[in-house]
């Protein structure tokens, strides 16, 4: 089945395959063609998202296992609903005791049969790491944890194996080649002799299995006890220290990862280890379940998580295409820059749609408010740093600490290439490291895609631009270093040194795996929390400083889009729920009122004893405005307010820690965090405080325009070229904050009841209460997509012009396929003059029926089109 509209489910132990199957009638009536599943494979116990998978050949038992998955698929298929599955080839969850593949690597080191699965540098230059993998999961420095007795040797009689457990959580297997010493300390000399006799054998030798069988009946009490010291007395733990030193892993404090990590991670998360899916044997092993399910037709399509993490994204996509003998939908999670396009030769159906989310909010913000909002922000916060400088600084910070080890490894590679050329041999480590940092910080996309087929011209241009930016920002660095970096990244150095071609390509491809995480952590997880002029515009894939998108640019993006590409406005990763974002966007139409209110609120809430950063205070007012419940026309109950306060406090704490200006995740500022919590408490301590009376008055005046924006966003997503995705629960008002807030349980019983009510009459008659009007609009347009699939999948896109003083605030377009037509019109910028809007006329012909009102349209004026809703969807009479 060709995807027409997807519905994203976040599966957890509390929302399983059976729960999704029970919603099949609801999804069918809503107009959904495919359920879009979060990762379904086995993950770490209790995972709330599934991106920490531990086994590629097992469907998560906590979700219902393979039997439950097949049952869900069959139930959905009865309602003509297919499945798209989120798949994670880039990394696996490590740490704890769930991942048998990672545990094998810890146990046997480079000799493990699956050591080649992971991107581990076994030849690390870090002292004490040669032949070992770093394990940065200790709560304190190694010596402190050792002396406290929090590293404990245990024997598992079922597996007949020894392991050291850190903090009773992280299993660190002991290599069987070391068992002889343990057994001898336990007085088991015969077994010790047997183990020592085969200590040089490979882990695949059957002798190890035979020896393990002999261990099962042995009493290991004395052996284990011999490694127990006295808590607090470090010297008494020397035996344990020596045993640990002999292993293929080195345990360190969690904060040491940035200095010494020697395996590729997902961004800076050390409990997610990179997988080398580019190796044919690893590809086969990691896809041995998912591909047969697709071939069988249980799964219709696949979404690839973090495609930029792979060393060769194009090669992976092509291998995936060729693995099946039938076509299938293939989407990639790829964050595109505003002027970037997804490479056509990847043979995908498009991205997961973040670019649309940014385009639509850019269209919806009122451009008239840009200057005023910029002035208000600067005056209130004192923040005058250019957005591009904030991003640049944030990226440099990421490379200086949490990703310093990865940068150091790249520096080694570039210096090794330079050593073979007498003209460049004098480049020093500090200069090369600094030069690489500046070039990476100057790159305006997540990564380039140089591969075995060479370099694309657009990538060559981006590399050249990044190098020029680096030279301008860091004139103190030898320009020859920048030129050398450019020669490597463009592969031009291989023309000078063809004998180094393989090393040059490998270095470039490794660099490309590095730039994406730096951009993600520097831009998404730092700069977007620092630059707070209008946080509705701060979203995954956005570009700080860009205030809006012209109508012409929006139409051009729609016309150029692959009609199979996903369109999204909310995901598990977005910074704010789609309707929270639309409400915050409405501030752009009310700058004067906003200026007055924030000054008033500051006077009511500020504390000389516990001051907070005014930039983060400014961020808070916007966040609270976006999250304030749409249905709270009166003061909320104390219980409801307390719940909101808890959510807002968690959202703000994550925001300020990510911003890393006043506090941070590691080595945070407890005093500042206490002051921030006190500020939030003053704001939300009771329903009828002076602050909340003023705030509620502001909400009453501005929030209706946020509702208008939400209906416009919904209409555009469901009618523009592309394949819309509905995030779970977002068919009603979706005012979540950043994760984990956006993964809260969804009240599907409410949605089922409301859908039954709104389907009985035209969408325009549905009330705003509880989001019923949004649900009605969504159902009407999804069912239109079901009735006219060719119109949406193959239809032309034609902008429709308007005449009149309100033309600049009217977005209209027509879709055509054969005799089928649809005219869509939206009244943007609700704070603008209504008389001007009402008098504006669309320049289109035909006899039309408004699908949302059920009424014929006699004239294409704003007054006729937007009497009940700010949107109109017209079909031929």
Image (spheres, helix red, strand yellow):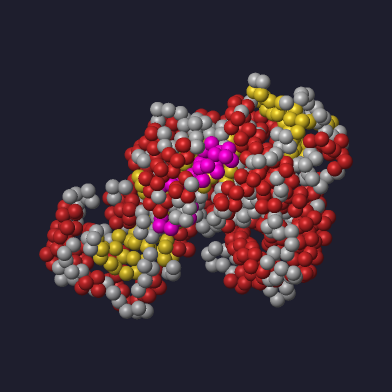
Question: On screen, 32 above or below 733?
Answer: above
Residue furthest top in the image: 818
Residue under the image location 31 percent in, 65 percent down? 164
Residue 780: name its quadrant.
top right
Q: How many marks do you count on the picture?
A: 0
Residue 374 in the magenta stretch? The answer is no
Residue 552 shown left or right of residue 291 in the figure: right
- Magenta region includes residue 29: yes
Residue at x-position 62% and y-position 72% = 674
Instruction: Quadrant for the C terminus, please.
Output: top right
Q: Is residue 782 left or right of residue 332?
A: right
594 vs 275, nearest the viewer: 594
Q: Is residue 566 visible?
A: no
How far across and down, in percent of the image, does residue 793 sit? 59, 28
Q: What's drawn in magenta, residue-wise?
A: 23-51
Horizontal side of 659 relative to 268 (left or right) equals right
Left or right side of 410 for 686: right
Q: Residue at x 74, y 46 (%)?
A: 708
Q: Viewer-proximal residue, 807 or 248?
A: 807
List x then y, in percent, for residue 161. Answer: 24, 61
Q: Quadrant of residue 99?
A: bottom left
Taking the view exactly as shown, the residue that stands out farthest to the left is 190
Residue at 33% in and 61% down: 172
Q: Position of residue 397 (x, y in %)?
A: 58, 56
């Amino acid at each position: 089945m060709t995807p027409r509209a997807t519905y994203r489910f976040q599966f957890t132990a509390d929302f399983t395959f059976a729960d999704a199957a029970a919603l099949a009638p609801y999804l069918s009536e809503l107009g959904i063609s495919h359920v879009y599943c979060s990762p379904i494979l086995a993950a770490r116990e209790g995972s709330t998202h599934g991106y920490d998978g531990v086994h590629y050949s097992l469907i998560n038992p906590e979700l219902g296992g393979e039997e439950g998955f097949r049952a869900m698929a069959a139930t959905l298929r009865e309602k003509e609903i297919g499945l798209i599955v989120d798949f994670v080839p880039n990394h696996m969850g490590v740490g704890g005791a769930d991942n048998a593949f990672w545990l094998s690597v810890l146990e046997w080191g480079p000799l493990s049969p699956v050591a080649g699965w992971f991107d581990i540098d076994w030849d690390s230059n870090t002292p004490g790491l040669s032949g070992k993998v770093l394990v940065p999961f200790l709560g304190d420095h190694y010596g402190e944890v050792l002396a406290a007795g929090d590293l404990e040797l245990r024997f598992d009689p079922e597996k007949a194996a020894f392991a050291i457990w850190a903090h009773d959580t992280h299993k660190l297997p002991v290599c069987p080649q070391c068992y002889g010493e343990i057994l001898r300390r336990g007085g088991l000399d015969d077994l010790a002799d047997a183990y020592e006799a085969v200590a040089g054998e490979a882990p695949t030798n059957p002798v190890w299995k035979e020896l393990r069988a002999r261990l099962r009946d042995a009493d290991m009490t004395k052996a284990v006890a011999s490694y127990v010291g006295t808590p607090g007395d470090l010297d008494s733990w020397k035996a344990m220290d020596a045993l640990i030193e002999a292993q293929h892993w080195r345990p360190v404090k969690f904060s040491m990862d940035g200095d010494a990590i020697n395996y590729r991670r997902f961004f800076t998360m050390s409990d997610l280890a990179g997988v080398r899916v580019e190796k044919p044997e690893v590809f086969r092993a990691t896809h041995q379940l998912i591909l047969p399910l697709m071939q069988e037709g249980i799964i219709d399509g696949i979404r690839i998580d973090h495609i930029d993490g792979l060393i060769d994204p194009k090669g992976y996509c092509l291998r995936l295409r060729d693995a099946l003998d039938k076509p299938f939908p293939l989407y990639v999670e790829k964050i595109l820059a505003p002027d970037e396009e997804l490479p056509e030769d990847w043979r995908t159906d498009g991205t997961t749609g973040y670019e649309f989310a940014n385009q639509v909010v850019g269209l919806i913000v009122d451009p008239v408010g840009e200057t005023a909002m910029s002035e208000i922000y600067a005056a209130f916060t004192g923040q005058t740093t250019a957005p591009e400088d904030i991003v640049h600084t944030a990226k440099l910070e990421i490379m200086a600490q949490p990703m310093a080890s990865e940068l150091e490894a790249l520096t080694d590679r570039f210096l090794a290439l330079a050593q073979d050329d007498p003209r460049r041999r004098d480049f020093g480590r500090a200069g090369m490291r600094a030069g690489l940092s500046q070039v990476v910080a100057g790159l305006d996309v997540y990564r380039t895609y140089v591969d075995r087929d060479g370099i694309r011209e657009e990538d060559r241009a981006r590399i050249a631009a990044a190098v020029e930016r680096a030279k301008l920002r860091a004139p103190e660095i030898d320009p020859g270093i920048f030129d050398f970096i450019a020669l490597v990244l463009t592969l031009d150095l291989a023309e000078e040194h063809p004998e180094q071609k393989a090393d040059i390509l490998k270095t470039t491809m490794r660099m490309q795996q590095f730039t994406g995480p730096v951009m993600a952590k520097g831009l998404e997880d730092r700069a977007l929390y620092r630059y707070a002029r209008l946080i509705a515009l701060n979203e995954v894939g956005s570009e700080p400083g860009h205030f809006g998108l012209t109508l012409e640019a929006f139409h051009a993006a729609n016309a150029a889009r692959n009609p199979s590409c996903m369109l999204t406005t909310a995901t598990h990763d977005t910074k704010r729920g789609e309707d929270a974002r639309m409400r915050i966007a409405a501030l752009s139409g009310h700058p004067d009122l906003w200026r007055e209110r924030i000054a008033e609120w500051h006077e009511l809430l500020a504390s000389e004893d516990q001051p907070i950063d005014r930039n983060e205070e400014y961020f808070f007012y916007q966040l609270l405005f976006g999250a304030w419940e749409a249905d709270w026309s009166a003061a909320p109950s104390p219980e409801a307010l307390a719940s909101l306060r808890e959510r807002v406090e968690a959202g703000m704490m994550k925001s300020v820690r990510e911003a890393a200006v006043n506090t941070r995740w590691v080595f945070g500022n407890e005093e500042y965090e206490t002051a921030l919590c006190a500020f939030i408490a003053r704001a939300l301590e009771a329903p009828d405080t002076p602050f909340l009376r003023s705030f509620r008055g502001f909400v009453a005046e501005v929030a209706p325009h946020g509702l208008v924006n939400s209906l416009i966003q919904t209409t555009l997503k469901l009618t523009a070229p592309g394949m819309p995705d509905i995030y779970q629960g977002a068919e009603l008002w979706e005012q979540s904050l950043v994760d984990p807030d956006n993964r809260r349980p969804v009240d599907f019983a409410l949605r089922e009841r409301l859908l039954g009510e709104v389907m009985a009459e035209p969408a325009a008659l549905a009330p705003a209460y509880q989001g019923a009007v949004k649900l009605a609009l969504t159902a009407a347009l999804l069912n239109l997509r079901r009735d006219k699939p060719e119109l949406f999948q193959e239809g032309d896109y034609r902008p429709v012009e308007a005449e009149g003083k309100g033309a600049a605030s009217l977005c209209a377009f027509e879709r055509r396929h054969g005799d089928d037509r649809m005219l869509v019109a939206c009244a943007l910028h609700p704070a603008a003059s209504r008389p001007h809007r009402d008098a504006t006329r669309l320049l289109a012909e035909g006899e039309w029926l408004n699908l949302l009102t059920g009424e014929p349209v006699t004239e294409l004026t704003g007054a006729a089109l937007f009497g009940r809703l700010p949107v109109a969807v017209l079909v031929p009479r």
